[in-house]
Image (cartoon, rainbow, N blue to C red):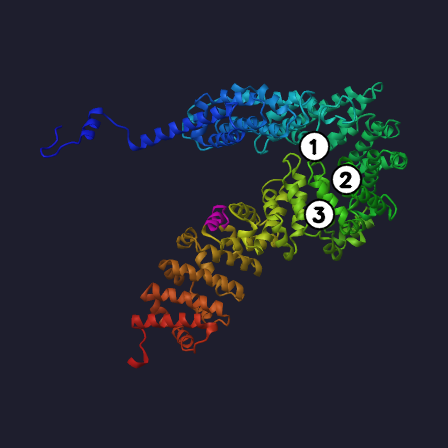
Amino acid sequence: MKPKEGLKLSGRASALQAEGPRFSPWQHLQLHVQFSTDARVQQMFEILLDEKSEKEKQEKAANNLIVLGREEAGAERIFQNNGLNLLMRLIETKNPELILAAVRTLSAMCTGHQARATAVLHVLGIDNICLWMSIDHKEISLVVCNLLQAITDSLSGESKKEELGKEDAVVLDTKKDLKKITVYLLDMLPSKKVSGQGRDRALNLLNKNVPRKDLRNHNNSRSLFVIDNGLKKILKVDGQIPDLPNCLPLTENTQLTTSVLLNKLYDDLRCDPERENFRLICEDYIQSKIDPQDMDKTLHAIQVVSGVLQGPFDLGNQLLGMKGVMEMMVALCGSEREIDQLVAVEALIHASTKLSWATFIITNGITLLKEIYKKTKNEKIKIRALVGLCKLGLAGGTDYGLRQFAEGSTEKLARQCRKWLCNPAIDPCTRKWAIEGLAYLTLDADVKDDFVEDEPALQAMFELAKTSDKTILYSVASILVNCTNSYDVKELVPELVQLAKFSKQHVPEEQPKDKKDFVTKRLIAASVTSALVCMVKADSTILTDQTKELLARVFLALCDNSRDRGTIVAQGGGKALIPLALEGTDVGKIKASHALAKIAAVSNPDIAFPGERVYEVVRPLVSLLNTDRDGLQNYEALLGLTNFSGRSDKLRQKIIKEKAMPDIENYMFENHDQLRQAATECMCNLVVNKEVQERFLADGNDWLKLVVLLCGEDDKKVQNAAAGALAMLTAAHKKLCHKVTQVTTQWLEILQRLCIHDKLDVQHRGLVVVYNLIHADQELAKKLVESEMLEILTIVGKQADDPKKQHVLNVARECLVKCMDYGFIKPLSQR
């Protein structure tokens, strides 16, 4: 097509026309991003692989590479530009900084992308990945563990990101790769070439990925595979004795992590035949190690039983019943070898958890424990013997009538434990046994009183709780639960107590000093919060659900007094409670949620839960609205939600998204005055949200009727909240103004009562509702003028100006002015 005459193309325009089709601006942008990312990736690798590059420049390039790997475009460019081989070269440099950067980049590339994760696994090789994880370097071992977790999550579909729609077109069979990873992890456990750190990582990965996360999923094939192919390898690690020469490399947390894995595998079994198979494998392994000619092998067998008792306790009790096992433990206490005594005493401590076994040990072995305690010069054995005596002395728990020792004996044992605990010359591994002893002794009221008053002992315990040895977390948490009396105590029905006594049945007795008036004296000072926060941050495998529950109980006890909540928040308690409320046992989650509700009810959310964290608190609070929870939990959750709903619309939206609205409405019907008041106040804040207003506008529900009727309640606080909600609703929608007059025949009487209320806040809100109705429609205004409302407005409006109630007078006068505008009333001058 020729240009029209009189129009000439410039030289550049004609040249462009001659070149043919051009790229669109969007294509130009895509090409620019692609080539710039390619260039950046190439530049990073050149700097990292150049031995002459400055160290600072290399570190910066390494960090940039990690950032690129976290972006989808960057990860894809690295992958397509021979990035895996280049990252392998970085790992082979043996420079720790470069290895960390390379592995972190690989983790980022694998996260949420199944195809890339598969490629990384095959190019690097599972054998190489496990080899890197096995080295005795804490940081490298950890990042390689994270890489393997990212690969596992992607292969199993656990961490699927929003993809561009291409990857889902190809379905990869990942079962073989996942099974191969499991096999290699199991092979790492008994290998002497694997470091203690590496063994812990392998155990953690098995703990996290093998047992089912949701028991509603009936497929437990991964656990069955591990039991059949690796249970004996796990038992080998569980039975290691650090003081023997052939012991595998371990950390202080290895054996407890192994016990946790055994417990999770056992809990994951679905039927008796599966549990029977588990037991038989354990029995075969233990029997194969018991050898009268080789005492080290026999000790290994006893240590396995001890480890199982710390894991699946019911199974451990069955193993104790094996012929000769219990007798062997008692006999070894009398051995001349110190290592025999050490292992035997530890085993007896774990065995005496069950009252029946404790009674057996008291009958058969307590004399030996006393002898060991008096005669041995080895502090490690002495303190374990003391813990054994502590545990046996408190075998009856809080039941005062089942005390095994004479009055005053437990206090003596506790003083010795506190003495060891406060002695910095003793190594931490030995001192932690003093905490173990106190975990039992603090069930006694006198002991817990003395312990709470012993500031050095408390501080020593907190310091140990913050060390890398996390095996004492459960014991520390138990001590704190005992000291705060935050365990559940069943109330005894007097009639049943009398019946039990008549039939000569044992009735649990409460320690005289454990009455409720003593409990408040034992609330630990808020300085424990920093230790609790540190404990919550512990490795997720060591921090078992049972330990989380104990920590949640302590937090709830500490939050009981509203004056302490500010200190708890200041020391990080609010942040620490969130994971406890979201994960763990049902009881633990409820306790942690209740503690959060107590904080949320009285604290500024911006300070207590800064940033995005506040949105994580909403779900635990909503969970407390369940009718199965007690009234106090319902009430404090509603107070917390009221506080939150008054902060921002985004928080109101989150509350709605968590499906709290039906529960809040339900409590507005509640007969209990405080619950009804809290629910109504919460609704008063929520009605600002458009989605909530739409629910009131919708036909077929009684939400508006309920609010109008609540305005007529005798409770002033309920009236105030309901009138506030009605004022905001009628201000937002004219349709709701009409609907107010239709939901109940009492609407006018209720409004009149509000407008003459003796409380100014309620009166003001009632007058605002009348103002909204008058301004919404002339017909509505006419209805109000024809009633006694005109007289009420006139009386209020004619009152002399008063700063205290000027806002009330102004609204009444504005109503009268609008009525004059409509022509319903006239000024005196025109009459």
Earlier residue among tags 2 and 1: 1
Question: Horizontally, is 43 left or right of 560 in the view?
Answer: left
Q: Secondary structure at mark 1?
A: loop
In the picture, residue 830 is in which quadrant?
bottom left
The answer to whether mark 3 and mark 2 are in CB contact below 8 A is no
Front residue of 814/47: it is 47
Q: Secondary structure at mark 2?
A: helix
In the picture, residue 256 is in which quadrant?
top right
Q: What residue is pinned by disc 2? A: 436
Q: Please name the amino acid that badge 3 sits on.
A: Tyr
- Name the mark nearer the viewer: 3 or 1: 1
Residue at the (50%, 27%) spot, across then down? 110
Q: How many marks?
A: 3
Magenta residues, start to end: 650-660
Instruction: Pinpoint residue 661: horizontal percent, then vertical percent.
Output: 49, 51
Q: How far apart in space, not on screen, are marks 3 and 1 (Cα)?
A: 27 Å
Q: Please name the amino acid that badge 2 sits on.
A: Glu
Q: How far apart in space, not on screen, are marks 2 and 1 (Cα)?
A: 15 Å
Question: Horizontally, is 405 left or right of 490 in the view?
Answer: right
Front residue of 559/686: it is 559
Residue at the (47%, 24%) spot, across then down? 46
Instruction: Pinpoint residue 24: horizontal percent, then vertical percent.
Output: 28, 31
Q: How far apart in space, not on screen, are marks 3 and 2 (Cα)?
A: 18 Å
Q: Secondary structure at mark 3?
A: loop
Earlier residue among tags 3 and 2: 2
Q: What residue is pinned by disc 3? A: 487
Q: What residue is pinned by disc 1? A: 253
Instruction: Pinpoint residue 589: horizontal percent, then vertical percent.
Output: 61, 44
